[in-house]
């Protein structure tokens, strides 16, 4: 009762100064579609919240300096050894600050979840065509968020100055060096001189805790502002069309559901941080430029680049008498190509489908077999490349020479994604004409029809004539019971 | 009390338990497992409570919100364009463009401070601390004698006085001199079967830390490039495309290995340079 009175008084106080009642009511009436896949982006958002909260705690203890110190903390095996101040403070945080190791591990797990949620959210957007007009603008913001977050993840685990991340930094430096003409200057700009140097850790610290988080937060703000302005897209269904959004209202139902999701993300992050060890830098040991660890794998989100570096043949060439070294093609050219393709996808998709319409209703994955096949090809390629980043471990486990295993993997990453894409294409085609059937309930004759093994009774035209025709408008009698109209915009 | 309300209350009760557990663990000094599980339990209770609350006590839709077209009516847009297209003199506009352009360029200059103080990259990357007569020392600074390098072992050597430089580390190995097939001109770079190569892989610069003694191969742990020691550390497989640069060796009066000069080419990962 008292809480309610205080809330009411607070709202009155605000409204007398901002005249916010109508605006707030409008905001609270925003309708969110009821589908689990719309919560993937929220998982990323809430992981970012976790990252900021735990990260602030960590930043108050971490010392971003390569100055040599003699470690004297409570971790016995390292006592008396000469390590950098950055590494020593990470060990001290892990062993001598109460709760420090927990927050370090929660921070690392949140970063892994953050990037996984972004990646899966991007897949959902891709496969349902949510990037189409008018949402290309948010696709561009989203891809930028993905790249910024990847960079900040790499920079974050590189700060600790341990032997494992030092190898990763060295590979990153060498990859920058391999860029033709400007490579040495780019590498020096990022690392502040020749690797390893004293400047890279403080520089990365500024990037990791200030510049990149500010950029990510700004991009998240833009991403959500555009989302609110354009309103959510929605899956096709009874009563849903290009002129409405059907779902739950922001207040109270969706807000409670979303608070539940925030709590669940925090519960999982803290559960993992408590139970599952991650990045034990005291095991890797301090960085030394002449030592390496084996095995050495990056965090999962950079596995695909590492896989490219491992699988790509030793190709160096000369341009105008200058060396273009071997990391250039797999480490720079191919990733840049992938990023450009990702940014350009809404326009590539439009080029192929010729679809210039404005869309508020999503495609089902089956509606565009060509896009689905392309997406499955790309996703399976990235997954296999990530798997290839552990080629040494797998080869040892299988007791085969790593060289032979690499040759086999080269064939696999070229062939298997094409097969996956083809299978996805056939399945999507087989399902497309049968809105009621699912992957698990489809009948063999549907596939046989696509493959031309037998003539289906009602053959669909090969090219989709446009999504509107695929989804005839549902007569309003079929619409679900509308409890209340949430339309209050434009007040 | 209705059933859903009891369930929600129970879920928030779990949060209270989690809070007590977290606080007690912190005070007792159990700082990772129990503290973390306390927090996790607390958040899990909140999650269950909120989700149950949303699913049982709150209005379930579906609600329909109308969507207004995301394009301004032509009149509005034209009015905005007219606002923006105010006529201005050509000279002030051009001078403003010139001013912003030159001023922006001036802002690029301080970026140079971020790059490096000292020799330009192409000079710094091309050389290491090795010079003719510099003694080979191990990681503790002790001189490396030819006798210390026994067959089958790998010694990592640094130029005396430069233990901390990132690019000078060399691997020193002893092989059968009769089996050595070094490139022409390097016959005098070894001391009785003792050879030295840069420790930095020519692919991505990782330390080539593994020596397979029976096959006399050096293996990089990062991307599994393999180098044939007997053939001047020529790449045999993996993504490396160039041999590890060889360090010319000789003996000083005391039987200590010394360099006879710097590596003949830049060490580590390749970069844009004339070849």
Image (cartoon, coloured by chain):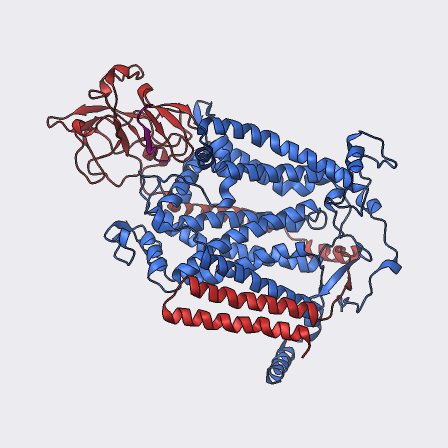
Chain colours: A blue, B red
Q: Quadrant of the C terminus of chain B?
A: top left
Q: Position of residue A13 (x, y in %)?
A: 61, 81
Vertical comparison of B78 with A368: above or below? below
Tell which residue pokes out farthest to the left in this image. Answer: B253
Label total for image: 0
Q: Nearer the viewer, residue A451 or A346?
A: A451
Segment tinted magenta in the rendering: B206-214
Q: Is residue A23 visible?
A: no
Q: Residue at x 25, y 57 (%)?
A: A72
Vertical comparison of A343 with A38: above or below? above
Vertical comparison of B31 with B70: above or below? below
A25 horizontally vs A69: left or right: right
A489 horizontally vs A278: left or right: right
Q: Nearer the viewer, residue A205 or B221?
A: B221
Q: Position of residue A422 (x, y in %)?
A: 69, 33
Residue B207: within the magenta? yes
Residue A329: within the magenta? no
Q: Is residue B59 visible?
A: yes
Q: Quadrant of the N terminus of chain B?
A: bottom right
Q: Nearer the viewer, residue A55 or A148?
A: A55
Q: Nearer the viewer, residue B213 or A46?
A: B213
B19 horizontally vs A462: left or right: left
Q: Position of residue B42 (x, y in %)?
A: 52, 68
Q: Position of residue A289 (x, y in %)?
A: 32, 40
Does the magenta stretch mainly form a helix, a strand or a loop? loop
A66 horizontally vs B86: left or right: left
């Amino acid at each position: 009762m008292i809480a309610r009175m205080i809330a009411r008084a607070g709202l009155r106080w605000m409204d007398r100064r901002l005249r916010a009642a109508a605006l707030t009511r409008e905001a609270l009436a925003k309708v969110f579609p009821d589908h689990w896949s719309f919560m993937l982006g929220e998982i990323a958002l809430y992981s970012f919240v976790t990252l900021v909260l735990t990260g602030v705690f960590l930043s108050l203890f971490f010392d971003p300096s390569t100055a040599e110190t003699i470690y004297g903390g409570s971790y016995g095996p390292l006592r008396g050894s000469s390590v950098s101040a950055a590494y020593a403070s990470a060990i001290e945080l892990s062993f001598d600050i109460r709760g420090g190791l927990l927050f370090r591990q929660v921070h690392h797990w949140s970063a892994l979840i953050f990037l996984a949620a972004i990646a899966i959210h991007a897949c959902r957007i891709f496969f349902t065509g949510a990037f189409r007009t008018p949402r290309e603008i948010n696709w561009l913001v989203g891809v930028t968020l993905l790249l910024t977050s990847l960079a900040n993840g790499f920079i974050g685990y590189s700060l600790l100055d341990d032997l494992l991340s030092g190898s990763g930094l060295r590979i990153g430096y060498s990859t920058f060096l391999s860029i033709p003409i400007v490579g040495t200057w780019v590498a020096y700009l990022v690392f502040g001189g020749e690797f390893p140097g004293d400047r890279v850790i403080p520089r990365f610290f500024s990037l990791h805790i200030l510049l990149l988080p500010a950029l990510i937060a700004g991009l998240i703000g833009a991403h959500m502002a555009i989302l609110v302005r354009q309103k959510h897209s929605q899956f096709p269904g009874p009563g849903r069309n290009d002129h409405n959004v059907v779902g739950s209202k922001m207040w109270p139902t969706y807000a409670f559901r979303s608070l539940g999701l925030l709590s669940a993300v925090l519960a999982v992050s803290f559960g993992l941080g408590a139970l599952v060890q991650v990045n034990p830098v005291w095991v890797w040991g301090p960085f030394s430029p002449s030592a390496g660890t084996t095995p050495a794998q990056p965090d999962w989100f950079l596995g695909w680049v590492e896989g490219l570096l491992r699988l790509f043949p030793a190709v160096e060439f000369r341009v105008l008498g200058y060396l273009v070294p071997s990391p250039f093609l797999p480490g720079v050219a191919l990733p840049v190509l992938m990023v450009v393709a990702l940014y350009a996808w809404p326009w590539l998709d439009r080029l192929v489908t010729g679809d210039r319409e404005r869309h508020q209703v999503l495609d089902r994955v089956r509606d565009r077999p060509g896009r689905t096949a392309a997406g499955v090809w790309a996703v399976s390629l990235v997954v296999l490349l990530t798997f290839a980043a552990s080629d040494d471990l797998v080869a040892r486990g299988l007791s085969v020479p790593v060289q032979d295993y690499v040759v086999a993997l080269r064939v696999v990453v070229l062939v298997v994604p094409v097969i996956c894409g083809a299978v996805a294409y056939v399945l999507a085609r087989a399902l497309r004409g049968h809105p009621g059937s699912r992957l698990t309930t489809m009948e063999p004759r549907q596939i046989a029809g696509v493959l031309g093994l037998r003539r289906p009774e009602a053959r669909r035209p090969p090219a989709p004539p446009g999504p509107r025709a695929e989804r005839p408008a549902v007569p309003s009698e079929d619409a679900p019971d509308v409890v209340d109209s949430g339309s209050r915009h434009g007040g | 009390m209705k059933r859903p309300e009891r369930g929600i209350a129970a879920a928030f009760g779990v949060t209270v338990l989690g809070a007590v557990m977290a606080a007690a663990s912190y005070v007792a000094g159990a700082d990772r497992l129990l503290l973390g599980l306390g927090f996790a339990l607390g958040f899990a209770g909140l999650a269950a409570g909120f989700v149950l609350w949303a699913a049982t006590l709150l209005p379930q839709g579906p609600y329909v919100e109308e969507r207004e077209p995301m394009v301004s009516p032509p009149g509005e847009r034209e009015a905005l364009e007219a606002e923006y297209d105010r006529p201005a003199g050509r000279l002030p506009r051009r001078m403003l463009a010139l001013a912003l352009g030159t001023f922006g360029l001036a802002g690029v200059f301080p970026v140079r401070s971020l790059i490096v103080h000292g020799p330009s990259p192409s000079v710094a990357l091309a050389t290491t601390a090795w010079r003719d007569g510099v003694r080979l020392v191990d990681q503790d600074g002790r001189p490396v004698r030819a006798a210390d390098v026994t067959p089958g072992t790998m010694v990592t050597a640094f130029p005396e006085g430069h233990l901390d430089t990132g690019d000078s580390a060399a691997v020193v190995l002893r092989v059968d001199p009769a089996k050595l097939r070094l490139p022409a001109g390097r016959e005098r770079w070894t001391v009785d079967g003792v050879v030295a190569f840069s420790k930095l892989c020519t692919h991505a610069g990782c330390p080539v830390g593994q020596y397979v003694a029976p096959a006399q191969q050096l293996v990089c742990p990062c991307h599994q490039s393999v180098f044939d020691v007997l053939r001047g550390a020529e790449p045999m497989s993996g993504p490396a495309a160039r041999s590890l640069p060889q360090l010319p060796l000789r003996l000083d009066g005391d039987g200590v290995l010394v360099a006879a000069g710097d590596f003949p080419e830049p060490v580590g990962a390749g970069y844009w340079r004339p070849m």
